[in-house]
Image: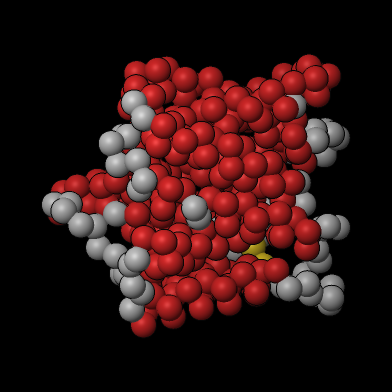
């Protein structure tokens, strides 16, 4: 298995992003009167527009390259808009742990299917092992915290919304990576900040009407406003800057698998800050996810290609 130059640093960048994202569930719990649509629209919408602003001059310079990829960017932007609405609604209905685990845990499989169907990629056996170990870990973590006060129907809807979040997360990761890499034999890619600025800028614009309709509670108190501000600036803006740097160096399927660190961070913060307790299988789940990250990130020196197809 050969590694893309800089793949090690790419993995580190994605892991930094996952750690920042892992704080969102705990921070959102400090603003219980703000609905999940408002939280999602503020976080990803404002964060996305900041990404576009950061890349402003470069976006103008690369406009012809971006126009050739308008369909990929449109798919990515729409996925960016849907993802936070589904993700935060899933956490509100099914519980923070279950919502996070379903959303992030389903993304690697969705990403692998997307790459298999659209890019004809074959997945390495190492990736399959790493993803499998990580998914077992997140399943164990999903058993830790049943949703409190949610009826069965709410939990089922929350799980479905988590699956939608996983698919849209995989889609915009694929779209961003495809935009950076070119996607055709003779087609040049664009820099990381340009691809992320374009896709997240489109998503941010699409989320602004949602924020306008649902965001009033964010202005009702300094506490609510500061939660929204943190979400937009730290996990969404800064986190996705790191994620973009990572996507420029590793495949989308690898990046989404490395993101399995997010529910581990979320569980740790729930224990340390919120005061929840992890049972034994929860700690086993944490250990398995960490083991999966080790499998995926430790460099392999040999050049033998061992690949398996996705059924």
Q: Position of residue 130 (x, y in %)?
A: 59, 71
Q: Position of residue 244 (x, y in %)?
A: 69, 43
Q: Is residue 187 above or below residue 240?
A: above
Q: Position of residue 51 (x, y in %)?
A: 66, 30
Q: Is residue 255 above or below residue 35?
A: below
Residue 71 visible in this rendered orientation of the protein? no
> Which residue ends up furthest to the left in the rendered image?
151
- Residue name at image x 51 percent, y 58 percent: 262
Asked whether, in this view, residue 284 is left or right of residue 199, the answer is: left
Residue 295 visible in this rendered orientation of the protein? yes
Asked whether, in this view, residue 226 is left or right of residue 35, the answer is: right
- Residue name at image x 62 percent, y 70 percent: 293
Q: Quadrant of the N terminus?
A: bottom right
Residue nearest the viewer, comparing 238 with 291: 238
- Residue name at image x 34 percent, y 22 percent: 216
Q: How many marks?
A: 0
- Residue name at image x 33 percent, y 72 percent: 277
Q: Position of residue 206 (x, y in %)?
A: 49, 21
């Amino acid at each position: 298995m050969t590694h893309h130059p800089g793949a090690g640093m790419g993995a580190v960048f994605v892991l930094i992003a996952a750690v920042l994202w892992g704080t969102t569930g705990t921070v959102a719990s400090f603003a219980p009167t703000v609905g999940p649509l408002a939280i999602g629209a503020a976080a990803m919408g404002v964060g996305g527009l900041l990404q576009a602003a950061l890349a402003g001059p470069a976006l103008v310079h690369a406009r012809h390259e971006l126009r050739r990829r308008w369909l990929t960017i449109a798919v990515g932007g729409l996925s960016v808009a849907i993802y936070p609405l589904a993700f935060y609604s899933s956490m509100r209905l099914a519980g923070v742990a279950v919502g996070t685990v379903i959303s992030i845990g389903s993304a690697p499989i969705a990403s692998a299917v997307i790459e298999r169907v659209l890019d004809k990629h074959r997945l390495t056996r190492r990736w399959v092992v790493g993803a499998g170990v990580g998914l077992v870990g997140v399943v164990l973590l999903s058993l830790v915290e049943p949703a409190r006060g949610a009826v069965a129907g709410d939990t089922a809807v929350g799980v479905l919304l988590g699956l939608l979040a996983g698919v849209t997360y995989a889609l915009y990761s694929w779209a961003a990576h495809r935009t950076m890499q070119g996607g055709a034999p003779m087609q040049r890619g664009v820099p990381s900040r340009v691809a992320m600025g374009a896709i997240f800028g489109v998503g941010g614009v699409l989320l602004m009407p949602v924020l306008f309709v649902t965001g009033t509670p964010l202005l009702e108190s300094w506490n609510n406003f500061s939660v929204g501000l943190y979400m937009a600036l730290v996990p969404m803006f800064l986190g996705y800057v790191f994620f973009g740097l990572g996507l420029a160096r590793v495949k989308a399927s690898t990046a989404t698998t490395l993101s399995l660190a997010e529910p581990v961070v979320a569980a740790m913060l729930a224990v340390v800050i919120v005061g929840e307790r992890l049972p034994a299988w929860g700690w086993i789940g944490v250990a398995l996810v960490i083991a999966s990250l080790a499998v995926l990130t430790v460099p392999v020196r040999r050049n033998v290609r061992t690949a398996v197809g996705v059924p």
